[in-house]
Amino acid sequence: MSTRIVAIVLVLAMVAGTLIFTLAGIEPAKTADNSSANSNVVFKLPSGATEAEAQQSDAPGKIDYSAIPDVIAEIDGVPLKKDIYVRALKSVEKQITASGGLSQDNINQVVKSVLANILNTETLITKAKKVGVSASEKDVETALAGIKKRFPDEAAYQKQLSDTGLTEKDVKTNIVNNLCVRALLEKEVISKVKVDPAEVKKYYDTNQAQFDKGERVRASHILVKFDPHATTDKERAVAKAKIEDIQKKLKEGADFAELAKKESDDTGSAVRGGDLGFFQRGAMVPPFETAAFKAKPGEITDIVESQFGYHIIKVFEKKSSGLVPFEEAKKEIETQLKRKLMNNEVRGYVEQVKKELKFKQLI
């Protein structure tokens, strides 16, 4: 099993209703178009785990639930029971089993990562409550709508809740906690992280190979999702009808960006009017790549079918291969350096909060 599958397994556990927050080694979850799909984080195997080590074992490992004590930690004098941890592990275990299993070593790594992230998250939730951080009902409803949009319909969403033993109230509680933790970190850590412009230029000058790009294209897209392996003919027909209606509106002069915001199932790019930025060959799935690189700037493609659904793509600009100018690369470098600084600062902040709240790990 690849690290990407492990990442998906853990994200699915979180979508199922378990709030998990990562402090290091994070990147946005990617969609079919390689853009950020949502605000979730992706967990990778700990450093040192190679693809070969992550392959399915002849004897798949197991999670030892009997070794989990009733109380896994004490935070600010309040015991944290094992329920949230067990529920997360069961969700993860279900997805691992469906994907073919993992070796015992990798099971142990996943279990350790899930535990660490739950303990860190619960610590931050406690801190957020103590300082009065709250989430608005509007923000909660918006986040809930985003979660529901990942499912084909309401029935599929309800089935997921039923399968994981959750109610919508549980999901909303997790959303509130997630929003409060983000607000806390934004105020106490993220807003204070600054990147020195000199460091940005230094990074560019000493990592030139990283910015020697091949042919690139900047495009936007509108996605109507379906799973080609699971979707029924009826569901596929509904998706096709929707993308054809969108195509009709575009031909009648509708604004591409506005339609993407309203209709695209790629929530990550939809908020930007479908904009994916620049990408090279190999970054997208073949049908999408072929259509995008074939189109001329200003053109809107015909409907493109990929393993993720139906796309309509609008190409804005093309660039030939060569070294990306510093001004163009600057924002990307700033983001990368800020993320590194931010992760370090967040780790330090969590340890500070643990001391403040007299955190005790009991597992």
Image: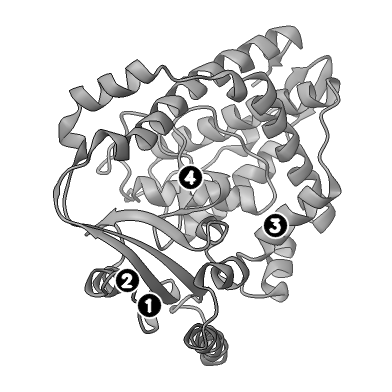
Label annotation for residue 24: none
Badge 2 or badge 1: first in the primary sequence:
2
Badge 2 or badge 3: first in the primary sequence:
3
User: How many C-alpha atoms fall within 10 Å of the one at disc 3: few (<14), some, or many (≥20)?
Assistant: some
Q: Label 3: which residue?
A: 164
Name the residue nearer the viewer: 336 or 170.
Answer: 336
Residue mark closest to the camera, 2 vs 3:
2
Residue mark closest to the camera, 1 vs 4:
1
Residue 124 position, x and y percent, is 71, 25
Residues tagged 2 and 1 counted as in contact (Cβ below 8 A):
no
Badge 4 or badge 3: first in the primary sequence:
4
Residues under labels 4 and 3: Cα distance? 24 Å
Q: Amino acid at mark 1?
A: Ile
Residues under labels 2 and 3: Cα distance? 34 Å
Badge 1 or badge 4: first in the primary sequence:
4
Q: Amino acid at mark 4?
A: Pro
Q: Secondary structure at mark 3?
A: helix
Residues tagged 1 and 4 counted as in contact (Cβ below 8 A):
no
Q: Is residue 54 above or below residue 120?
A: below
Residue mark closest to the camera, 4 vs 2:
2
Q: Is 25 on the left or on the right of 90, as rendered?
A: left
Q: Is 291 on the left or on the right of 215, as rendered?
A: right
Name the residue nearer the viewer: 297 or 261.
Answer: 297
Label annotation for residue 28: 4
Q: Label 1: which residue?
A: 300
Q: Is residue 94 above or below residue 323?
A: below
Residues under labels 2 and 1: Cα distance? 13 Å
Q: Is residue 201 above or below residue 55?
A: above
Name the residue nearer the viewer: 191 or 47.
Answer: 191
Q: Label 2: which residue?
A: 288
Q: Amino acid at mark 3?
A: Thr
